[in-house]
Image (tube, coloured by chain):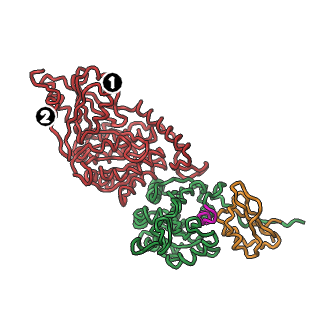
Amino acid sequence: MVKVNILHEYCKSCKLCIDICPKKILKIGDKANKKGYFAAVCIDQEKCISCGLCATMCPDVAIEVYKAKG
Amino acid sequence: MSTEMKQVFGRSAGLTDVPFSFCPGCTHGNIMRLIAEVLEELEIIDNTIGISPVGCAGFSQNFFNCDFIGAAHGRAQAVGIGVKRSLPDRMVFTYQGDGDIAAIGTQHAIHAAARGENITSIMVNNAIFGMTGGQMAPTTLEGMKTATSPYGKDTGKDGFPIDMPRLLSQLSGAAYVAAVSVDSPKEIAKAKKAIKKAFQVQQAGLGFAFVSVLSTCPTNWGLSPVESLKWLRENMMPVYQMGELKVSEEVAKL
Amino acid sequence: MKPERILLKGNEIIGEASIQAGCKLFFGYPITPSTEVVEYLSGQYPNRGGDMVQAEDEIGAINMCYGAACTGNRVMTASSSPGVSLKQEGISYAAAVELPIVVVNVNRCGPGLGGLGPAQSDYYQSTRGGGHGDYRTIVLAPSKAQELYDFTMDAFDLADKHRNPVILHTDGFLGQTMEPVVLKPRPEAPVVDRSWVVDGAKGRDKRVLASYSLTNEIGEANNLKWEAKYKHIEETEQRWEEYYTEDAEYLLVSYGTTGRICKSTVLNARAKGLKVGLIRPITLWPFPKKAFAPLIDQVKGIMTVELNTGQMIEDVQLAVECKKPVYLYRRQGGMLPTEHEILDDLMLKFNLTDEEA
């Protein structure tokens, strides 16, 4: 299941999300977006705790965060 | 069996879908997100008119999902006052950089506060003139190297940084003045609270509300986005007075 | 019911006319000789539903007008020459965003701090778009109390009709003179398109009123649009008064207070048997070129009468395509000429004697 969704075309590869992630599961991906930025990606959705810190720090509002219900 | 998911973080309805055009890591985006969320939470998006300045903050007119008016450099508060006097039941806010408010627009900021004009002003302070290529601003710190202080700002020649929120908090018509930052999740949470209160002050008709937000400018500071947050924390926060600097009696009751 | 006729000072007349025209917003700053506009409205507004700000400065005032005009309400500011200089950036912005704003200039003499006396030395500033960029503002020049009233009303209607700033260009003499004026009711307001107004995006898409052109292509397209508008205004809004021009051999051209004095000059000249007439521009921009076309062949010479070093004279020379001599009679520094001085100079310039009659 997808807990953190980084919107590929909005990301500017600034790494603020990577820096803040307490689980260290965000990395710069290997696919460039239309603007030429290598967007960040989540490399281990299972480990994500849906804390939302990445989305809080993202200056491009490029991250959606989901949490399991219940 | 698939688990049901709920979204806990998404793009506010207070923002358009247009991707921000700011530099990577520029915290303009964070600040705009907070304002957009506040507009949505207070249910005032379609009753709000924003005033954009000249500077990087000028692009705000493309990113907020409400009516906007572009003002001349430094004049956003005067423009906002004209709007508010014309349509007193609308919410009016200005979104300005430190170059706009603390240099050319100081006159209007002071008098908006002195008269207690019922608008909300947000100042994004990155201690530099960003849009035009990183020149020294009245908020630039001592020793900071900029395009017009290539050897470092010399306070003997160019003066000390102006602390706008501290200045405005002295004026009777200023009902709420806060100085916040967006360098960490904790500070971002404080910033959102202050911004929300600044709009609630306007809703209640209590006078001038001003929030100064310390922000980064990685491009002109010559630092990475992550390093910029650290630089802000270590250099700007000690110089500028932080926190809620003015809370009038009526605002305290809100 | 007959409209009221009262005695008011020039500047107060402007204030009263603006209220009668449905303008309930004013942003200004005290500057002699325009201050009575601010003072009159500050006394009238509380009981007549208006709101005004005595702004921190002229720049604040014009920008407040800009904001208020964006919301679709009528708005006015009033100042005098040095203050109007400060407003130029704001007027340029208002022209770019196409806002109806009425700006009153009670012209005093300059440059610099100058003096408080009447002048026409802001003619260029008013008619050439005194701020940066290629824009024009409609300019109306009253010459007496009733015109101060009527033209203030016209200014608002023209501003709304063309979505453009309008300057009411008067002078310190008119502003300070008390005369009876008939408080005519407001003429029927023009029906205007308001789909551009910014007043909160309830039930519609958001609107942005701004003037940054992101690309050169956009910049050019914008300027072409404004150029077309100004051409249309030039074609349709030229206004002037003709006085004894039908058989005139010599023309005086003058506006405002001197336009009024020149009427006496014309009568005195006619009494001497000299065929002198007057064209009194009412719109300084668009300049009333159409007034001159039928008279170019007929007249022997023209003299402009101005309170400056010679500004309107260029527009007159252009209007007659330099086909006939155009001279200048001028006073400066706040001085006003008498009707006799003007006639003496006309006769001197064109070598006329009483016996010529």
What chain does mark 2 sit on? C
* Mark 2 residue element: helix
Residue C124 is situated, as x and y percent measured from the top left of the image, at 32, 42
Image quadrant occupied by the N terminus of chain C: top left
Q: Residues within 10 Å of mark 1 (few under 14, many from 20)?
A: few
- Would you say A54 lies left or right of C220 here? right
Q: On screen, A59 above or below C192?
A: below
Q: Which chain is green?
A: B
Instruction: Name the residue at 41% across, 66% down.
Output: B110
> In the orientation shown, which residue stands out farthest toward the right?
B1
Q: On screen, C7 above or below B98?
A: above
Q: Read off the residue under disc 1.
A: C293
* Chain C display color: red
* Chain A display color: orange
Q: Is residue B29 magenta?
A: yes
Foreground residue among B92 and C337: C337
Q: Amino acid at mark 1?
A: Ala
